[in-house]
Amino acid sequence: MSLSVYFQACKSMLGYFIGGKMLPSWDMEIQVFCDVVRHRNKQLFPESCDKTIDDIDYDKIHEGFAARPMPPSKLSIDVGVYCAHNITVSDCNLNPDWLPGIGIAEDPLRSLIEQDTTNTSASRQIPGELLACWSACAVHGIHRNSHERALEMRPLADTEKIVLCLHGGSYVMGSPASHREVLGKLTERIKLRCFIIDYRLAPKHPFPAQLHDAFIAFQYLVNCGFKPHNIVLAGDSAGGHLCINLVLLLRHIAKATDKQLMPAGAMLFSPLPGIVLHGASLHANTLFDYIRPTPLEWPTSPLRLFYKPGQIYNDEYRQEICDPLLTPAFGDLSEFPPTIIQSGSSEILIDDIRELYEKLKLDNPEHGRILWEEYPEMVHVFHRFLRRPESQAAFDSLAKFVASL
């Protein structure tokens, strides 16, 4: 912990005891966390402008994120076990013949596929982790003292469902390690195994490298024997945005190939609604949420780092970021699998998340297909506060959702 972060934590605790709670339901943990992370985000995403864009060292920015990663978390042995599973990309890559009509991602995806196929020295690997909680093991008659089979990447039964998790972190941070604890609690409640990948991060690997890796992970599960309709997508923040992108890509490929590729469902936790954000909550909730609004006019904002870092924010850029793979609410979201969205009323993205939900609901009018839950006074991805009653209620709701699939 840096000295400035330590000072901010002390200042926040003092403020909690002297000035009181920011919101009536908050405890000291959530208040100090929000203050400290908000302070840290000011350092990670400094104010900038396009006038000095040529002076920005994006390699240095990427190295800075790598040097200050999201803290790793532990999976308690009382909850379950996990092990590494790396994906060999050459076994699961996208077919470029499937891409015509996909939109703004077509050309860069072709380039990424070509890079993988022309690198003959060594096939690229995508790191991943398979989490097996004891409750999921028990469903298949697997006990703690003989759990090796639960860590094998193959279905434990023909009907077994598995979660493919795409982590959050503004597309510039995050890893399987940062999400172990919260995924452990999630999978313990829904009684499913979970596979989470360490997809490539911006700005070194901008859009659509993350979508490319997400598809490869989905295809990897299919190659391992899991049927597409038994794969449940899950993602928080940027990972939720990536889940939506993956569904759009799978829908496109399914239509092009006449294959059944759609997943069983999607669980989205405070999903990033898109690159274009305009809700009033962006500013109304800045006092509460730990993520802060960073205007697209800043070339060092996380969304500018994600999409075409180094490009000027001009009319062409503004038009491009309205593509459905960047801002889904601007596109056709029909034929979506059953989806549940959970968000907090005090997060800065709540208005734009609400708009995304309304578009999903409009394009998928079947009763109960698209669900949305808003938790009062909660912030972005509040699920991380595992002892909060709101988190417990959210996990209970997710268990009911998964059981209905």
Image (cartoon, grey):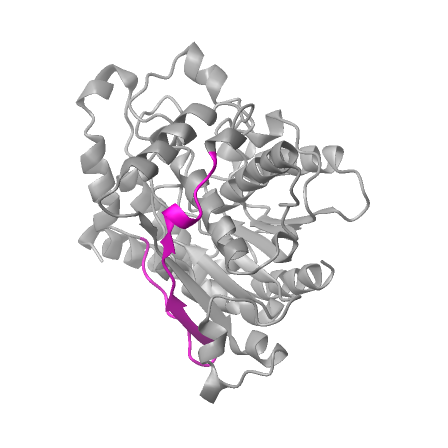
Residue 287 position in % (x across, y down): 45, 42
Q: Is residue 104 magenta?
A: no
Q: Is residue 305 left or right of residue 270?
A: left
Q: Residue furthest front?
A: 120
- Which one is nearer the viewer's eye here, 260 or 319? 260
Residue 85 belongs to the span the image colors magenta: yes
State the image coordinates of residue 372 (x, y, percent, origin top left): 68, 47
Q: Residue at x 47, y 53 (%)?
A: 220
- On the question of residue 18 being in view, the answer is no
Camera-nearest residue between 320 and 397: 320
Q: Quadrant of residue 391?
A: bottom right
Residue drawn at x 36%, y 58% as measured from the top left: 86
Q: Quadrant of residue 352?
A: top right
- List x then y, in percent, for residue 299: 31, 25
Q: Start and end of the magenta stretch?
A: 70-95
Residue at the right extreme, as displayed: 367
